[in-house]
Amino acid sequence: MELGALIFDVFGTCVDWRGSVAREVAVAIPSVDAFAFADAWRAEYQPAMERIRSGGRGYVALDDLHRENLEIVLDRFGVTCPDPAQLARAWERLAPWPDTVPGLAAMREKRIVAPCSNGSIALMTRLARHAGLPWDCILGAEIARDYKPKPQVYLAACAALRLSPDRVMMVAAHNDDLHAARAAGLRTAFVARPTEHGAGQVTDLEPDAAWDANATDFNALADALP
Amino acid sequence: MELGALIFDVFGTCVDWRGSVAREVAVAIPSVDAFAFADAWRAEYQPAMERIRSGGRGYVALDDLHRENLEIVLDRFGVTCPDPAQLARAWERLAPWPDTVPGLAAMREKRIVAPCSNGSIALMTRLARHAGLPWDCILGAEIARDYKPKPQVYLAACAALRLSPDRVMMVAAHNDDLHAARAAGLRTAFVARPTEHGAGQVTDLEPDAAWDANATDFNALADALP
C-alpha cells in the first residue's frame, strides 16, 4: 500500500525542549541550574502520564501536567518563580532543530504530515505557530484521550486520517516510540537527535531495530520518500 | 477578553461546494443536470446528520454520509457512475472562494484559525491540502463526535484550544450556524456568500441578527480584526 501520511513525535524529535526550557528557566529563576531544572521537570513527565495510562486518573491534558509538575520541581529545588503559569507555557515556545522546518515542508509536498505527540491540541497548535511547524492537522494524545506508548494513540491518528496503519509512518528520535508504533501496525522511521539530552547523551544514539527508515535528519528523510 | 481564535464554517463559507461538486458530477455522469445532482446530494446532508444529532445513530463521519447519500441520489436520478467512491471524494476537492486563502492567511497572522465544520478531520485535512487553506489545526464535528448546530461541537473546539467561548469567534455564511455559536457563548462573524446556492439564492443574503462582525469577505474580516 502507498504511504499516505507521516506522523511525528515532537518533543525531542522536532524541537529542542531541553535547551528551550532551560533558556526560559534561566530568566525566570536565575538562582537555579537551568539545565538541571529542565531535566528534573521533564523527568516528572512519564510518571504523570503513567497514572493516566494505567487508569489511575482520567485524561488530563499535558498542559496541566506540565503545570502540576512545575510545582513539584519548584518545591524540590526550594525556589519560587514570579509567574509559574507563564513559565509552564514555555512548552509552547520550543525551538525546532535546524532541519525540522525545511524537512517537514519538503515531506508535506509529498504526504500528509501531522504531530502524534503527547502534547494537547492547544499545545501543539501554539507550538506550531511559534516554531513554524507546517502541519496539515494536529493528531496525538488528545484525540485518543490517552498517552503514548498506548497503541490507541497511534491507531487514533491513523483512524482520524482514514488510513490503515500500514499506510502511516511514525517518525521519532526514540526507539521505544517506534517499537510501540510498529506493534500497532505502523511503519517506522528513526531520526537520531544525539543532543536532545545534552552533550553527554547515552540513549537513542542509534536505531535499536531494523526500522523502515533511518535518516540523519528530516531533510534526508524527505529525500528518501518516494 | 482578548480574541484568541477564529473558527470557520467551511462548506459554503470557505469553499464553493456546489460549483466544485457539479464540475465532478458533469465528468462522472454526463447524462445528468450536474447542478441539480449536486443540490440533491447536498439536500441529503441535513437529514443524514439529523439521525446522528437526535441519537438515532452513533457518530458516523461525513465521508461515509456523503458516500451513502451519493447512492440515494444516484438511485433517485436513475443513473450509475463508474467509480462512486472516487466521486464521493469530490468533497475533498472543493475550490475556495477567491478571498478565502489570502483572507485566512492574513487572519492567521493575528490569531489562531481553524475549521469548525461538520467534515471529518480526514476530509478537512485533504480539502485544506487541495484548496491551500492555511489552518493552524483541524477542529469540528469529529472531535465532538456530533454535528453542528449541537452546542458541544462549538464548545469542543473552544476546549481543544483551551480558550473560553468568549475568546473564540465563529465565522460563517449561514445565520443558523451563528445563532447556535452565539447560544454556546462564542463571538460571531457573518460573511455573505450570495452565490453558494447559485444565481437565484434567496437565503443568507444578509445577517439576520446583530452579529459581532459583518464583513463582505475574508480580506475585510482580516482587516477588521484588532
Image (spheres, coloured by chain):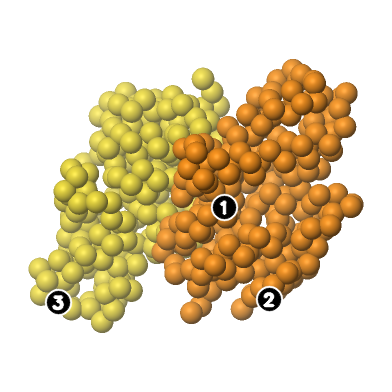
Chain colours: A orange, B yellow
Real-space CA distance between mark 3 and mark 2, rounded to the nearest whole angstrom: 51 Å
Task: Say left or right for A142 vs B188.
Answer: right
Q: What element carries label 3?
A: loop
**Residue B114 seen:** no
Instruction: Classify B38 as above or below A56.
Output: below
CB of mark 3 within 8 Å of CB of mark 1? no
Label 3, on which residue?
A: B79
Kindly identify the amino acid type of the residue bearing the numbered disc 1: Lys
Task: Say left or right for B49 vs A171.
Answer: left
Q: Which mark is residue A210?
A: 2
Kindly identify the amino acid type of the residue bearing the numbered disc 2: Ala
Instruction: Classify A146 as above or below A3.
Output: above
Q: Are marks 1 and 2 on the same chain?
A: yes
Real-space CA distance between mark 1 and mark 2, rounded to the nearest whole angstrom: 21 Å
Q: Do labels 3 and 2 share a chain?
A: no
Image point (68%, 49%), residue name:
A11
Real-space CA distance between mark 3 and mark 1, rounded to the nearest whole angstrom: 48 Å
Q: Is mark 2 on a helix, strand or loop?
A: loop
Q: Which chain carries label 2?
A: A
Query: Would you call the spot at circle 3 few (<14 residues within 10 Å), some (14-19), or many (20 or more)?
Result: few
The residue lying toward the viewer, choosing from B198 and B226, is B226
Q: Nearer the viewer, mark 3 or mark 2?
A: 2
